[in-house]
Image (cartoon, grey):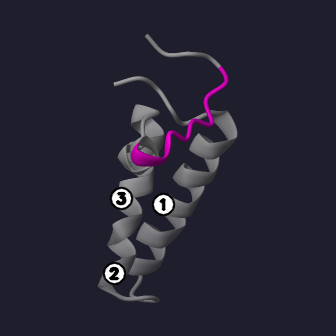
């Protein structure tokens, strides 16, 4: 897996994921908010499978 998620993208994914999970945990938005786990995981891995078909990469350096 080559990294395809850059720095700002990773930060935004992490923040959005945490907000969604927190809102779901408090019952504000319902159980669907736990989908926030997905952006948290993709931010932690630095790789997003949804970027592959489109050839998108927000990562400045080339992965190995």
**Cβ atoms at labels 2 and 3 below 8 Å apart:** no
Please name the residue shown 53% across and 50% down the image: 14
> As rendered, which of 42 and 63 lies closer to the eye?
63
**Cβ atoms at labels 3 and 1 below 8 Å apart:** yes
Please name the residue shown 56% across and 62% down the image: 16
Choose the circle earlier in sequence order: 1 or 2.
Answer: 1
Q: In which quarter of the image is residue 61?
A: top right
Q: Which mark is residue 37?
A: 3
Q: Quadrant of residue 59?
A: top right
- In the rendered image, which residue does mark 1 sit on? 17
Local packing at callout 2 (Cα closer than 10 Å; few below 14, some 14-19, many 20+) is few
Above or below residue 29? Residue 49 is: above
Label 1, secondary structure: give it: helix
Q: Residue 42 carries which label?
A: none
Please name the residue shown 55% across and 41% down the image: 56
Residue 28 placement (x, y as % from top left): 46, 89
Please tell me whether residue 2 belongs to the stretch shown in magenta. Answer: no
Above or below residue 2? Residue 27 is: below
């Amino acid at each position: 897996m080559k990294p395809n998620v850059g720095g700002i993208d990773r930060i935004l994914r992490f923040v959005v994921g945490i907000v969604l999970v927190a809102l779901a945990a408090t019952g504000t938005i319902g159980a669907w908010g736990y989908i926030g786990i997905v952006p948290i995981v993709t931010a932690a891995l630095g790789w997003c499978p949804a970027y592959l078909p489109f050839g998108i990469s927000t990562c400045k350096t080339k992965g190995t």
